[in-house]
Amino acid sequence: MRDLINLTAEEIARGVCERSFSAREVTEAFLGRIRAMDGEIGAFLAVRDGAARAEADGIDRRIGAGSDVGPLAGVPVAVKDNIVMSGERVTAGSRILEHYVGSYDATVVKKLKDAGAVILGKTNLDEFAMGSSTEHSALGVTKNPHDTTRVPGGSSGGSTAAVAAHFAPVALGSDTSGSISLPSAFCGVVGLRPTYGAVSRFGLIAMASSLDQIGPIAGTVGDAAAVFRVIRGADPSDATSVEYGLEELSERTPEELVGLVVGVPREFNVPGMDPAVIQGLAAARKRFERLGVRFTEISLPHVQHALAVYYVLMPAEVSANLARFDGVRYGGITDNRQPTTDNLHDLYLKTRGIGFGPEVRRRILLGTFVLSSGYYDAYYAKAEKVRRLIADDFARAFDPAGGGVDVIFAPVTPTPAFRFGEKTADPLAMYLSDIFTTQVNLAGLPSLTVPVKKYAVGSGELPVGFQLIGRKFREQDLFGLGTLYEDSPC
């Protein structure tokens, strides 16, 4: 029997359409691997055994009838559990939503189903997507498939671990400050943080609405591109989403790709980087240069303030977005609610206190503080101004009129995956994991994380990744360069 779990999503879709194997066979292969191995990894919070089989059977029937089944026919997909699905629990990794069941499909889920994908289940995450390690999930721990003593990264750790462990060829994650990029680097997979507005956020449980974006995680650049082509585009239910034009969708020829100029920000050369990361980035750059890609040094003078800006703006939006979760509505935590309270205010205090974990509480308190009277101008308003300066730095770097670069090459994280418990006692050390990714979200730019080398799970070697940052809505440039790197023999 063919080794179905090691096929790419593109190979699965082609094989299902050509009837080399059925969607049901593919689904059973991945469900079997999840049953056998996820007890050790903990990537999934829920597996849709029956529903996934029914979806696969429906694809096979449509193919048998000669109907169009879409570009992801029979491709198994894992979905981060802060993305709503009709009839499925959506917990956001939190006790406060532990029993909430979605009443509709998020736009990205609907698009995946329409494209013929089979949804295997919902994956683990840091609570409300707040974390860099998936250690902050209230519902369990996810381990890095390359070394189970180490974190998979966060907050999309369940999705990246699922792809790395071959539980699914592709997955969906969400990214607010590296939540796709960082775990993709830690787990040795490909992750796309799309341009802000490229993908509808309708059905994503909001963390920080001006920063959140849904994106694909995959084993190859080609698979990430295939999923992105399905989920991108304008949505009437999300006013921030936009439609792509012909220019943004056009692919560059190989000659055009090697003619792209890649910038290397001098500000990203920071002290304390792990030697493995430094060596990995140097190896990736040398491979690109052997292919003919030209590198040049650039400056982004304000990115040094990005982390400070983020930890003012993000908590402020968290404080507003999470105000709706009071522990009473959305399925709540009624079993644990104190039975007697004097008033509604006390009831909310008790139920929210039971339901939210310490990291979520910390960010809500920070956000409430920076938005409070007397501090708004000193913190929030000033952070918004610096955010604009950071975006302007990138705009100048990409400006064709000023001889700007086409793409930016950068590290994703200062270290490979760290051990469990290594940073949980020091929130600042944990926050510094996002030092190379926060500015991308603040500027609303696309970023593609690519493994320097694809180490096999169980090899004992820890993955290292690099990121390619592009102009707004030019994901195609990132996919082109990523594929060029991935396919090169040198």
Image: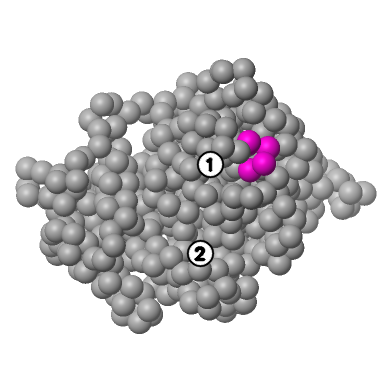
Q: Nearer the viewer, mark 2 or mark 1?
A: 1
Instruction: State if disc 1 and disc 2 touch (CB < 8 Å).
Output: no
**Residue 256 seen anywhere in this rendered image of the structure:** yes
How many marks on residues? 2
Amino acid found under the numbered disc labelled 2: Cys
First in sequence: mark 2 vs mark 1: 1
Q: What stretch is highlighted in magenta?
A: 22-26
Predominant secondary structure in magenta?
Answer: helix
The label on residue 12 is 1
Is 379 magenta? The answer is no
Residue kind at label 1, given as amino acid type: Ile
Q: Where is residue 414 in the image (x, y as percent from the top left)?
A: 39, 73
Q: How crowded is mark 1: few (under 14 residues within 10 Å), some or many (20 or more)?
A: many
Q: Identify the element where label 1 is drawn.
A: helix
Pick the front one: 170 or 338: 170
- Residue indicated by mark 2: 187
- Secondary structure type for disc 2: helix
- In this view of the protein, can residue 100 be seen by the observer? no
On screen, residue 105 above or below 153: above
